[in-house]
Image (spheres, rainbow, N blue to C red):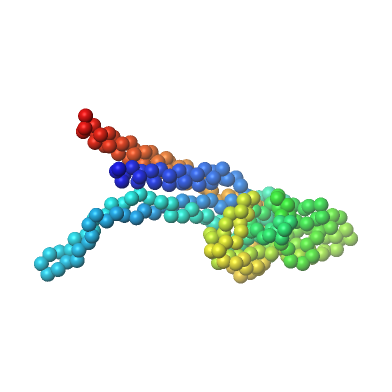
Amino acid sequence: MLRSLYSGISGMKNFQTKLDVIGNNIANVNTYGFKKGRTTFSDLISQTTAGATAPNGTQGGINAKQVGLGAQVASIDTIHTQGSMQTTGRVLDLAISGEGYFEVKDANGASFYTRTGNFYFDGNRNIVNSSGQTLSIEGDAIIPADAQSFSIGTDGKISYVDADGVLQEGGQIQMFTFQNPEGLDKAGGNTFQVSGNSGPATQTFAGEEGSGSINSGYLEMSNVDLSEEFTEMIVAQRGFQSNTKIITTSDEILQELVNLKR
């Protein structure tokens, strides 16, 4: 069979994967803290029909003759660039300006990391995300229900005015950094988990050891650029279409070969 048939099939599969990634990006264009994906390709092995020869005293060298056997998905990257910030005016809406992640823990104590900062109080006055996972805070983090007001500084320190009008400290939000943030695994619910290639989580505080500052009253938007995604969609669509043309053209050639014997 013609090599071009299988090359076309591999190309179609790759562009389908690219479209899957683009579709997910567009679906999450308004997801707070979402980090977009990107697909890259590489060629498969090449079949050598004639090897290279070195030059000698009487004749020049000859390059190898190789026929490529298609393409493969080289990587599906998560792009951790900063998203734009949206003003909300709500104290428990937190956006990180710069590097770093919030840590949230589930009921089993498992750690997850996120850039999504829409937090809430639960029935015990713990600060949790929309999935009920608890935000990691150092120190006494309980803000009493009868507090007159509370605030969160750019360094993550929580303070509140109690019922008697006295300013109190309420702990400090922990931040975490990684040697390779792009190596984190997506765990759903706008969270990430440590992987074998992300490096361990390093605990710090906002503004320390390369971590960014915390902005209360803001949320980080998705870093998806719709104009870029639609352009990549066109490229993927035309690439898929071109590979189908390779297959139909190869089929026509095979049909001509079959028709030689009538």
Q: Position of residue 68 (x, y in %)?
A: 31, 52
Q: Quadrant of the N terminus?
A: top left
Left or right position of 67 against 167:
left
The residue lying toward the viewer, choosing from 13 and 21, is 13
Q: Residue at x 82, y 64 (%)?
A: 168
Q: Quadrant of residue 111?
A: bottom right
Q: Residue at x 55, y 64 (%)?
A: 196
Determine whether 235 is above or below 152 in the image.
above
Q: Quadrant of the C terminus?
A: top left
Name, please, the residue furthest toward the right. Answer: 164
Q: Position of residue 13 (x, y in %)?
A: 43, 44
Name, please, the residue furthest toward the top. Answer: 262
Q: Residue at x 31, y 46 (%)?
A: 3
Res 141 seen here:
yes
Determine whether 246 is above or below 184 in the image.
above
Left or right position of 255 against 136:
left
Res 92 seen here:
no
Q: Residue at x 43, y 47 (%)?
A: 14
